């Protein structure tokens, strides 16, 4: 049995230079030693506040950004060592959909042409292209006459369906979605989530979904990774993370969801202060400036990542004593 993950990352580091005053520049750490894997057929959620590195992680995993250090592996092979043909295969097999699908569509291109582009590149004959486009459009709930229309004639929800259809036309193994529903109305969100779930089965996809909305991730994901200031602080099966989290940051995120679990509504504020800047990450445990449990050790020593249950890890000095 092959246990090699479909897509994995080891110790990813990604920084950006940011212009400061007087022509100075500073380093923003977007990803700091991030390790993860996506198994075949799995849906993995990536959660955390804005600015925690989720979108950067999605782009690095999709091969759209190159990490400063660390590795991304596709089927066990380093992306950096893929032969040219395998690189092309990886790009086709790993598709990304974005929060704003409009930005990834050519406004002057008819929808049918946009969706058929990957088929054209793959050398599929025209007649078959048209048949495939019709089939995929029907699968994502787009009307047949949409082929001859332009992106600005569609609503936000329809544009996201177009983005999904375009990604599916490449017949990917992996779909990486960056906040796919966050700009949509609640009722439309549910429709798009259901389409993703259906397409996962129909196209035998593995998915990585980036979202700040933990309820969306609980609904759609097998496992969830919680990120804080560029690092993974907890990772575990979705149901276990909701029922028995192992990190104070996850606990705070769950407690902030209105009506999730009224019985456990905290009597004290679980998140102190604002999110620090990724330009100056606190030493020791990076969460210590906001953690109500922080002790001296937390301020000076980076906590190790420990597996507390099968596939459930957390990086907190006090996780064992806080959560049993
Ligand atoms: Fe809080 Fe300390 Fe755990 Fe960090 S290591 S989450 S500061 S208790």
Image (tube, rainbow, N blue to C red):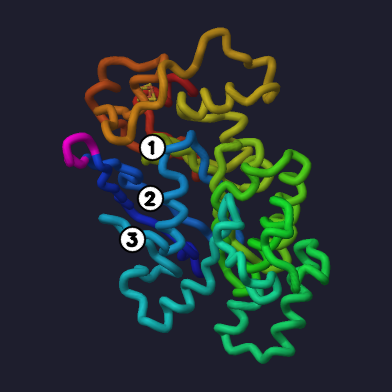
Span of residues in magenta:
20-25
Dot 3 and dot 1 residues touching (CB under 8 Å): no
Left or right, 202 with reference to 238: right
Res 285 label: none
| Magenta residue check for 69 | no
Residue position marked by numbered label 2 in the rendering: 35
Local crowd size for mark 3, using a 10 Å CA cut-off: few (<14), some (14–19), many (≥20):
some
- Please indicate whether residue 312 sits to the left or right of residue 132 in the image: left
Q: Quadrant of ligand 1?
A: top left
Q: Name the residue carrying label 3.
A: 66
Nearer to the camera, 157 or 314: 157
Front of the two marks 1 and 2:
2
Give the answer, above or below, for where 142 lies relative to 91. above
Residue 4's x, y, as percent? 46, 65
Task: Say whether disc 3 or disc 1 marks the residue closer to the N-terminus.
Answer: 3
Residue 306's label in the rendered image is 1
**Furthest-top residue in this view:** 267
């Amino acid at each position: 049995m092959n246990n090699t993950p479909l897509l994995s990352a080891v110790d990813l580091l990604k920084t950006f230079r940011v212009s400061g005053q007087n022509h100075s520049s500073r380093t923003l750490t977007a990803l700091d030693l991030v390790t993860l894997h996506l198994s075949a057929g799995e849906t993995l959620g990536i959660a955390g506040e804005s600015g925690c590195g989720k979108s950067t992680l999605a782009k690095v995993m999709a091969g759209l950004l190159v990490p400063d250090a660390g590795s991304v592996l596709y089927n066990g092979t380093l992306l950096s060592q893929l032969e040219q043909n395998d690189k092309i295969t990886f790009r086709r097999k790993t598709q990304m959909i974005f929060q704003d699908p409009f930005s990834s569509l050519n406004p002057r291109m008819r929808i049918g042409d946009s969706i058929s582009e990957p088929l054209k590149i793959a050398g599929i004959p025209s007649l078959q292209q048209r048949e495939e486009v019709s089939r995929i459009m029907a699968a994502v709930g787009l009307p047949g006459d949409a082929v001859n229309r332009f992106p600005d004639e569609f609503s936000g929800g329809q544009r996201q369906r177009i983005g999904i259809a375009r990604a599916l036309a490449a017949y990917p193994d992996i779909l990486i979605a960056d906040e796919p529903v966050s700009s949509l109305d609640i009722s439309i969100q549910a429709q798009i989530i259901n389409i993703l779930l259906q397409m996962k089965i129909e196209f035998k996809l593995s998915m990585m979904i980036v979202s700040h909305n933990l309820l969306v991730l609980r609904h759609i994901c097998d496992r969830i990774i919680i990120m804080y200031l560029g690092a993974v602080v907890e990772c575990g099966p979705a149901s276990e993370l909701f029922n028995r989290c192992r990190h104070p940051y996850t606990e705070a995120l769950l407690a902030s969801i209105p009506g999730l679990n009224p019985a456990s509504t905290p009597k004290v504020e679980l998140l102190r202060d604002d999110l620090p800047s990724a330009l100056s990450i606190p030493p020791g445990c990076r969460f210590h400036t906001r953690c109500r449990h922080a002790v001296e050790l937390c301020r000076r020593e980076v906590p190790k990542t420990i597996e507390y249950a099968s596939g459930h890890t957390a990086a907190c000095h006090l996780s064992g004593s806080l959560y049993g």
